[in-house]
Each structure stands twice: as structure tokens, then as C-alpha cells.
Image (cartoon, rainbow, N blue to C red):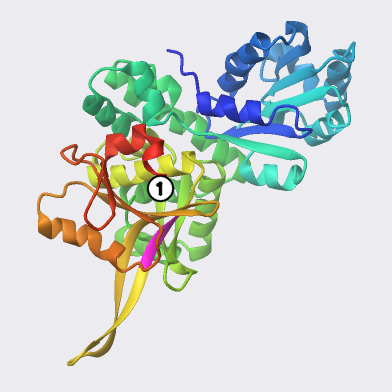
Amino acid sequence: MIFPRKKNLDQLIKHQNNGLIKIITGLRRSGKSYLLDPIFKKYLLETGIKEDHIIKFDLEKQLNSKYWDPNELAKYLESCIVDKDKYYFLLDEIQLVKGFEFVLNGLLHIPNVDVYVTGSNSKFLSSDIISEFRGRGDEIKVFPLTFSEYYECVGGNKHEALISYMHYGGLPQCASIDDLEVKQHYLVGLYKTIYLADLKQRHRIKEMEVFDNLLEILSSDIGSFTNFKKLSNTFKTVLNVNVSFNTIKRYCEYLEDAFLINQAKRYDIKGKKYIASLKKIYFTDLGIRNALIGFRQYEVSHLMENLIYNELCYRGFSVDLGIVIKNASDKNKGNIRNYFEVDFVANKGYKRYYIQSALIIPDAKKMAQEEKSLDCISDNFQKIIIVYDDFVTYHQNEKGYIMMNLIEFLEHPEYIN
């Protein structure tokens, strides 16, 4: 099954020949290598680049192991340049080269070379990109397939496709498998043999049982507020294990750095500041999340919330959890503070959107409940309610709030404009 990854291809085209190293990052098995070859290579050929000026080099192949020596790799790449025409170096699994940053930085000084690289998460994480290539690299993040990308290829009934997508996620290889049992086996094996092995190798984690338990707790609690202290207390009260605040914080950072999870922070909309006490954990791929807990919990409202968060991130928004704090007086209790939650505050440039996620809105009482938090926001940024139930279709209600169902949100980026 072929997934064209049009948005990622457009990103590569936009950054083509900009004098920086294009660094393709993202969750393992999300399609980074496939993006370079065949997708980007095909584009280059179609735009007139000669094939012998596209140097695709897979360092994971045993035949290329001698080029793990940075001097050998630099010598070989420079030998490929025989004229003044533009050359495109597509280097896969660059982390296998010790001192790869020196090789890449050296290529920046060759004017007719444009460099694109991928790397595996065991030695090539987001923190590496920031520290090694500050000012010299362009990070292009590859996400698992969005629902639109997934449905474009699988077709069929959209609601059935959405249920399957929320259950098995958007990793391209998994999406290409028809048998449901094989899908589950693939996802469980991927976590155990790839992701866990990467994390263990990089960070030398000794308390693997604690690490596994933490992942299961996080998987079970998507859509729920938590913090490191609360997670530490869960270990103590539920598992009778003492795990420090700092250990949990460090393990969550490992998972985020490996693109497995994202930590969404709470933002005080009225006070215009972050509240450090609570956050939510969302998984980059729902299939991996479900595999971690044996596909036992299928809570549509929480999966929907995670899915909306991922889609907003894919579209380039920075996403926070909103809260509006309003003071009120009570004749019995005196001054009290009321807290109103907004599921997402999505920011991009000068634009901001307030978004509520609802499973169903069966009556006026439920509608009032969903609107209440939005009603407390006094600015004029767009307010949106996304409903799983497709009885709601795209429209603007009497308060000016945009209403749409989940599939409409996933398939029509222009609806948030």
C-alpha cells in the first residue's frame, strides 16, 4: 500500500536548497526513510534531476558498514561530486556513523550539495538535533499517518475506518495489514523489540519493570490530568513500590524525546500563564498506546481527545490545555474560585482557537455544559466544538461557535480558519 505523504513532501520541497541540513525526525516506523526514497527521490527525478546526482545511501546495510567510519563516509560522498551541478545526498540511518555531525557540517561548505538525513531514535533524538545542529539544521518531523492519509488509501465506510484507525493507529506498515490479529501482533512486537530496545540501549534503564508499569499507567490515563507527584503516589498506593518524582520525570522525558508521547501543559487563559501543577499525556500513535494495555481499554472520548491533539500538532499548532479561573462570591462560603476547563488552546502565529471535544450532545443541557467554558472567555478568537456523533455537521451556532463532527474536523483543515 502506497501512502504519498503529500504534506511532508511539500515541506521537503519548501526547504530544498536552503543551505541547511534537512533532518527527518519522528517516531520509528512512521515512514521517514520512505519519505526520502521513493517519495522525495521520485519528485527530484520528475523535476529534471539526473539520477546519478541523487546519492541515496542506506548506512544500515551491512555492505555499507565500512562507511560508519566518518572519514570513509566523507571521502566517499565527496568522490560522488564530479561536476558543478546540484547533488542531493539522501542519507539514511546516519546515527550509525560515529561523529556524523562533523561529516554533515563539512558538507554544508560544499555549495552544490543539498543534504537530507534520517536517524533512528536510539541515538538520534530530538534533543540531539537541538544540541548538534543549532542554526545549521532544519528539523522536519514525520508523524504517523493522519486519518485523512489513512482513509485516502484504505477507503470503505468512513466510520468503520475511523474506528479501525483509533484502535490500530497510523503507522504505515500496520495500516497496510488487513488481518486484525496480525495488526495487534505487529504493534506489540514493535514496542517490545524496537521502541523498548532503543530506550534501554540509549539510557541504560535498569528498572525496566518500573518503566513498563509507568507506560501502562500513562496509557490507561490518556485524557486525564496528572503530574509527576501523582504518578509517584500511584506507584506507592497501587503497586506498593517507591518511585521518586525525579525518576518519573526523567522517564517521561525519555519517552517524549523518543516521540512516543507528548506532555500537554495547562494554560491559564485569563491570567496568560502556564500552570505547572497538572498536565495530560498523549500518545503519538494510538495503536502503540492500545498495544501497551493489551487493547483492553477503548474509551472513545479519551481516544478522540488524543486524536484531536495529534491532528492539531500535525497541522503545526502548538497545543495547550486551557483553563479559565473566575472569582465569585457565595453568601455561605464567601469568595470562591471557579475553574472552567477548555480542552485545547491551539496557537499558530497570531491565530488562536479554543476547542472543546464532546462525544455526543444529545440535548440543550449537554450543549450548555460544553459551551460554559467557552462562554467564560472574553477575547474574540474562534471557539470550536468538535463532536464524535455525526448528527452534528459543520455550522455556526447562535453564539458564533463553530460546530463540526470529528470526521469533518479530520478531513477539512480549512474548517478551522
In the image, is residue 99 part of the stretch drawn in magenta? no
Q: Which residue is mark 1?
A: 282
Decide which of 417, 243 is in the foreground and name it.
417
> Residue 278: which quarter of the image?
bottom left
* Observer-nearest of 366 and 182: 366
Q: Residues within 10 Å of mark 1 (few under 14, many from 20)?
A: many
| Residue 228 in the image, given as x and y percentages of width and height | 44, 62
What segment is highlighted magenta in the picture?
319-323
In this rendering, the answer to whether 199 lies above or below 182 is below
In the rendered image, the quadrant that contains the N terminus is top left
- Residue 321 is inside the magenta segment: yes
Q: Secondary structure at mark 1?
A: strand
Which residue appears at 73% of the width and 7% of the height? Answer: 51
Task: Name which residue lies at 43% across and 44% down.
Answer: 312
Q: In the rendering, at what x and y percent does residue 159 appear? A: 22, 28
The amino acid at mark 1 is Tyr
